[in-house]
Image (cartoon, grey):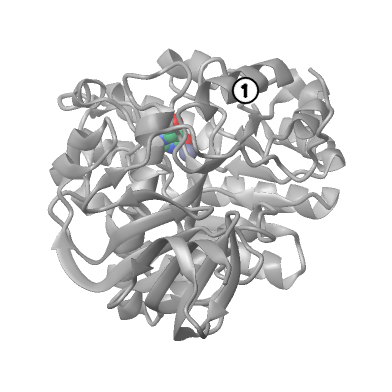
Amino acid sequence: MPTYELIVKNVRVVTDKAIKESEIYVDNGKIISIGFHEPVHSADVIIDGRGMLALPGLVDTHVHFRDPGMLQKEDFETGTRGAAAGGTTTILDMPTTQPVVTNPTIFKDKLKVVEKKALVDFGLYAAAGMENMEQLHDLAKIGAIAFKSYTVSPPSERVKEYAGAVVRNTGELFHLLENSTATGLLHCIHAEDDSVVQYLTSKLQASGRKDAEAHCESRPNLAEALAVHQAIGIAEMTGGKIHLLHISTREAVQMIRSAKARGIRVTAETCPHYLFFTKGDMQKLGPYGKYNPPARSHGDIIALWEGLKDGTIDAVVSDHAPHSREEKDDGREDIWKAPPGTPGVETRLPLVLSRAMDWGLDMLDVVRLCAKNPAKIFGLEWRKGEIAEGMDADITLMDPGAVWKIKSSELQTKARETVIFDGMEVKGKIAYTIVRGRVVFEREVGFEKPGGGSFLAGQKAISDFKV
Ligand code: DOR
Ligand code: ZN
C-alpha cells in the first residue's frame, strides 16, 4: 500500500467545472489523484477537510514586496506570510525594488536575496524602459516572468524608485513594445496618461488643494482611458501581447471588451480596492486611500463587476503596495505628500467572495478570477491555478460559511496600520494553505519557516543562461 505525502479527506473540491465531495492524494508535491481510494491509503500528513472547500492555491500576479531596498515597507518574508495567510500560493513580484530590476545582474541578485525568505512560490518581473531595451532578451532568458512599464511618471521624490520602468510618451511605448514582443514575453502596462496627470496635478496644487479627493481629481477617468486606448492601439499594430494592470474605469472596460472582440491580444486585471471604494470614501480614508490609479465612482464599480462577469476583465489581483504608516501619515494635511499604494495580499479572497454573489458570480467564477486566469495569463497554467491530476499540489482549504471581520492588527504586512479594509465584514476564512504538498499556513498553528517557496522562471527562461 503506497504512502502518500499528503491526503486531504472529506473535502468539497472546487475543480474547473464543479464542486464535488472527494479526497485529494498528493505525492512529491503533485496532485496524484482526486477521488476515493479503497482501501484508504496512509500518508505522512492527513488533513480532515470536513466542512471545508478545497480551492486551487490562489495566484496573485501583482504584488510589491519592496525587497530588496525598502524593507521598512515590507520584505519577502512578511509579504509571502501575508500571501500564505490569505490562501495565495503563487505571487509575482513587481520590479520596482531597489535597484529597479533592469538587467540580468540585478535580477539575479534580487533572486538570491528573496528566495531565502519566500514561503510561497514566486516569479519576478523585469522593468522595461528605453534605457534597458538592449537587455530585454537577456532578462527573458534569465527567467523574468513578464515586463512591466509605467506610462506615467512618478512624483519627483520617487524618480529613483521607478528609474528605468517609465516610458515618456506614446512613441517610446510603441518602440518598446516592438522590442519586448520580439522576446515573446508578456508586457504589462500601468496605463495612465502622463500629460493629463501632470497638467491637472499642477493646476490643483496651484489652487491650493491638499485634500484627499484632489488626488482623484488629478487622475480622472480620462487619464486611464487615453493610456488604455493607446496601449491597445499599439498592441494591435505590433501584434504584441499586453496585459493591462489595475483597470479602474468604465471607459477602459468598454475599450478592452471591444479590443478582445476584434481579436487583439490583450488581458486585464482589477483589484479589490477598485471594487469597494469610491472617491466619496476619500475623506474617511485620507492618505491610506491614496493609490494609483485612484478610487472612482459607483458607475465604474458596476462596470468592473460586469467586466469580470463577461470575461472582459480576466483577473482580480491585489496590487499589494505597502507603505509605512509614517510615510502615509505625511499626507494627512497635504495629500500630495503621501506615497500611493495600499496593502491587500492577505485580504483578496474574502473580499471578492463576500461581494461576488451579489453581482451574479459564483465560487467557480471567483476561483477563475483569483487563481486560474492569473496563472494562465503568465504561462503558469500547466502547474498552477487548478486542482487537477498532475498539477502542483497548491491547495487552499477554506471554511466558506465563516463570516468574520477583517482586523488589520492581525495581518502579516508591515503596513497593517494603513489597511483600508479594517473592520469590514467578509465571508470565507482560510484554514490551511498548502504549497506543493507542504502546509505553509495553518490558522491554529502558524507558518512554515521561510525559504521553501520556489522560483518560477518565465516561459522564455534558458536554464544554462549565464549573466
Ligand atoms: O498605488 C500604487 N502604488 N500604484 C503604483 O503603480 C505603484 C504602487 C507602489 O509601488 O507603491
Ligand atoms: Zn502595482
Please report the residue visible at 32 percent of the width from the left and 19 percent of the height from the top.
72
Is residue 395 shown left or right of residue 179? left
Q: What kind of element bears circle 1?
A: loop
Where does the image place residue 264, in percent across and percent down from the top left?
Answer: 75, 62
Outermost residue, right direction? 182
Residue 116 visible to the viewer: yes
Is residue 324 shown left or right of residue 159? left
Please report the residue visible at 43 percent of the width from the left and 21 percent of the height from the top.
155
Where does the image place residue 122, in percent across and percent down from the top left?
Answer: 55, 40
Q: What residue type is labelled 1?
A: Val
Nearest to the observer: residue 158 or residue 371: 371
- Quadrant holding the C terminus: top right
Q: Eyeballing the image, is 293 above or below 348?
A: above
Q: Eyeballing the image, is 192 above or below 351?
A: above
Is residue 298 shown left or right of residue 101? left
Please report the residue visible at 67 percent of the width from the left and 31 percent of the height from the top.
169
Mark 1 nearby-residue class (10 Å; few <14, some 14–19, many ≥20): many
Q: How many marks?
A: 1
Nearest to the observer: residue 323 or residue 47: 47
Which residue has dot 1 on it? 101
Residue 345 visible to the viewer: no
Q: In which quarter of the image is residue 366?
A: bottom left
Q: Eyeballing the image, is 333 above or below 171?
A: above
- Quadrant holding the N terminus: bottom right
Report if the beta carbon of the residue with label 1 is closer than 8 angstroms to ligand 1.
no
Q: Eyeballing the image, is 441 above or below 455?
A: below
Where does the image place residue 146, in percent across and percent down from the top left?
Answer: 68, 40
Where does the image place residue 386, in percent across and percent down from the top left?
Answer: 57, 67
Please report the residue visible at 70 percent of the width from the left and 36 percent of the height from the top.
170
Outermost residue, front direction? 1
